[in-house]
Every structure is written in structure tokens, then in C-alpha cells.
Image (spheres, helix red, strand yellow):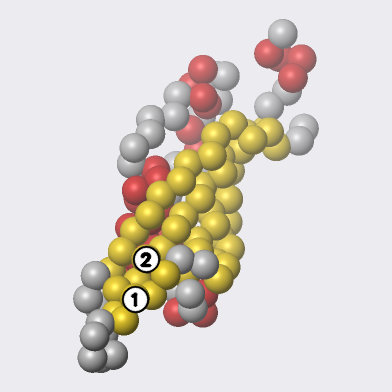
Amino acid sequence: MPLKRMALEIGMGTDIRGADYTKAAVRALRDALWHNSLGIAAALNMPTDAMVVEVIIGVPKPELVNQAEVLAVLPHGTGTIKVVEGGLEIFNDTGTGSTVIANAAAIVRLDIDRKALR
């Protein structure tokens, strides 16, 4: 059966002084996930680990994100991650440090049987 999109969750995270791209990305995904309590799987009599979560992170330098560390945030299901160019990096007045802002999208899908929903 095909995976059906059930939810889109969006978040933002920052590392104010450390310019740590992974820390900002982890905070962005937590922001997206921690404001929700998805009961979709349970409502369909499916385990929460049946969820397939596609994570998309936007930061100015995608290669600086530890993808495994970001995916470790997911409390349920299995996840994939794609890190793309986006977000912001704001340098301080002296150019010696910066703030990194990451954006996150978590797309939650379930493999559902449409006939079972009728």
C-alpha cells in the first residue's frame, strides 16, 4: 500500500553564539515535534512506530549538519533526512562569531489501506 501523508510539522531552531549547525538543526526538529501529539496511528489501530518521517532541514551550510544526530531526535517510527540550503547565519559586528538559524519540516506518513477506512 502507498504511504499517505498524515501531517506536516514545522519548526525553527538556533545556536545563538556557537555557530553549531547540528545543534540548531536538532533544536528546529524538536520545535516541530514537541508541539504535537499525533494520535493518528493509534486512531487507525497502528503502532506509533509505523510512522515514516521525512525530515528536511534548511541551513546555510548543509554539509555541517550531523544527520544521524538530528534523526536521533525522532521518538517514534523510522526517519529519513535531507539537509538543504536555507536558514540564516548572522555574523556578529566583529565577524568573529555568528548565530545559526535552522528550519525543519517533518512530514509524517503512514502505510494505510483506504478500504479499511471506509
Residue 96: image quadrant is: bottom left
Q: Is residue 68 in view? A: no
Location of residue 106 with respect to 46 vertically, above or below: below
Location of residue 5 with respect to 42 vertically, above or below: below
Of the pair 31 and 68, the residue shown nearer to us: 31
| Position of residue 85 in the picture relative to residue 92 (left or right) | right
The image position of residue 68, as x and y in percent, is 46, 66
For this orientation, the residue located farthest to the top is: 118
Q: Residue at x 51, y 47 (%)?
A: 106
User: Is there a contact, CB below 8 Å, between mark 1 and mark 2?
Assistant: yes
Count up the numbered dots. 2
> At label 2, which amino acid type do we have?
Ile
Q: Is residue 15 in view? A: yes
The image position of residue 47, as x and y in percent, is 51, 29
Q: Residue at x 68, y 27 (%)?
A: 112
Location of residue 41 with respect to 83 vertically, above or below: above
Quadrant into which the N terminus falls:
top right
The image position of residue 14, as x and y in percent, is 31, 64
The disc label shown at residue 90, or none: 1
Work out how far the residue at label 1 is from the one at label 2, CA to CA, in angstroms.
8 Å
Which residue matches tag 2?
101
Q: Secondary structure at mark 2?
A: strand
> At label 1, which amino acid type do we have?
Ile
Q: Depth-wise, is mark 1 or mark 2 nearer the camera?
A: 1
Task: Give the crowd class for mark 2: few <14, some 14-19, many >=20 residues within 10 Å.
Answer: many
Location of residue 14 with respect to 112 vertically, above or below: below
Q: Residue at x 31, y 81 (%)?
A: 91
Of the pair 115 and 14, the residue shown nearer to us: 14
